[in-house]
Amino acid sequence: MDKFVIRGGNPLVGTIRVSGAKNSALPSMAAAILTEDEVTLENIPNVRDIETERLLLASMGAEVELRKGELKDRTVINCRTLSDPVARYEIVKTMRASSLVLGPLIARAGVARVAMPGGCAIGGRPIDLHIRGLEKMGAVIVQEHGYLEARAERLRGAHIVFDKITVTGTEDLLMAAVLAEGDTLMENCAREPEVADLAALLSAMGAQIEGAGTATVRVRGVTTLHGARYRINPDRIEAGTFLIAGAITGGDLIVANCNTSHLGAVMAKLEEAGARIDVLGPDSVRVRASELRAADISTEEYPGFPTDMQAQYMALATQAEGVSLIRENIFENRFMHVQELVRMGANIKVDGSAATVRGPARLTSAAVMCSDLRASASLVLAALVAEGESIVDRVYHMDRGYERFEEKLIGVGAQIQRLGNVFAPKESAVFAG
């Protein structure tokens, strides 16, 4: 397992570019199942989950090309042949987004066999909302031997009200509805930019969708979709992570190739915490920080403060003057990074779904272990300001969702080296002098 060795203490200065959104790319790749024509997606990040999705589609008989070199951010998908509509456990066990092929497979092939999904162990993300919606549209679904087996001669439009807001559930049923017979009305939908991104792709493929990105979405089913060429949004979570990196290190960082309209909650909270935020344009923002101060957060569905930024913000809170209260309202098991931050010297107390962070804390180097994708980012951020050299282990979690993360940080002044599965170096063995 790879690990990072990080020497803290360097302000990050310069410009850092954001990659495409993994959480837009994965449902967009699944949407290619809905047509026999070629779908070309641009701004695709080179991360492990994308490779897993490629293997998944290829195992079903699709042709998937991930372009390299100058066009490495592009994938061309042809699902003309779906010889084996099965999402096998050995492929999808590490990726929660595998459930996103369920709706498209039933809509296109009338049959699907999908392994119960895996991914980060951050709490329950039940797939029952997907199943209920598909059953209302006429699918017959049973669970056996760890797989969901679904059949439908043709899905029918339905009125679906989600019991709770679900991003992947909204996306899955949206993809199913576009080929269903008749109209589908979905209420209490997720409003995340990634949902709107998927809807824009589907519309480019010939779907008839109204209200995507709002709580109420209407879909008029069509008989076929055609191919399309589409560029997905920049990754708002990666952009937010880099904004916090600039603030926590007291740097002067420009985050470019982002969509600033998707960063409102994060930028507002950073300003409240003492960072100086200057929006330079629709795709660029500058962050500077001097004296950080405590500010509370409460994670909410978009447009609220994202749960995927909670761990990174907690790292920032360890360096802020005062007491910050962090409430996690989305996932019940998303404080696994707390104990690792405490190992570095953070003063954090957890009580149920709330964490109290007292700062500023003097962080010192330690060997810490990543437990999930966003926890990985928080530990790297903490290591950037810790005294000495920290070892951040199991960074394969980070590779699932951040493209060339350490390389981008090195480009703006961070001291990071990636190591293979070797013994941790002692006292300046990596960064001599």
Image: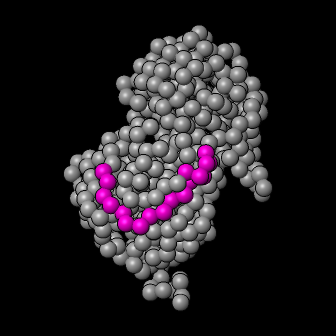
Q: Residue at x 54, y 88 (%)?
A: 432
Q: Residue at x 57, y 32 (%)?
A: 196
Q: How is the image coloured?
A: one colour
Left or right placement of residue 138 versus residue 55 in this view? left
Q: Within the magenta stretch, is there residue 29?
A: no
Residue 404 in the image: x percent, y percent? 61, 61
Q: Is residue 122 visible?
A: yes
Task: Quadrant for residue 224, please give it.
Answer: top right
> In the rendered view, would you say 366 is above or below 106?
below
Q: Residue at x 60, y 20 (%)?
A: 209
What span is colored magenta in the figure? 279-296
> In the rendered view, would you say 42 is above or below 293?
above
Q: Which residue occupies the extreme left position in the image?
A: 351
Q: Is residue 110 visible?
A: no
Residue toward you, 150 or 66: 66
Q: Which residue occupies the extreme top position in the image?
A: 182
Residue toward you, 399 or 415: 415
Q: Residue at x 37, y 39 (%)?
A: 300
> In the rendered view, would you say 157 is above or below 414?
above
Q: Which residue occupies the extreme bottom position in the image?
A: 433
Residue toward you, 271 or 402: 271
Q: Within the magenta stretch, is there residue 283?
A: yes
Residue 105 in the image: x percent, y percent? 61, 27
Residue 311 in the image: x percent, y percent? 39, 55
Task: Quadrant for residue 56, please give it.
Answer: top right
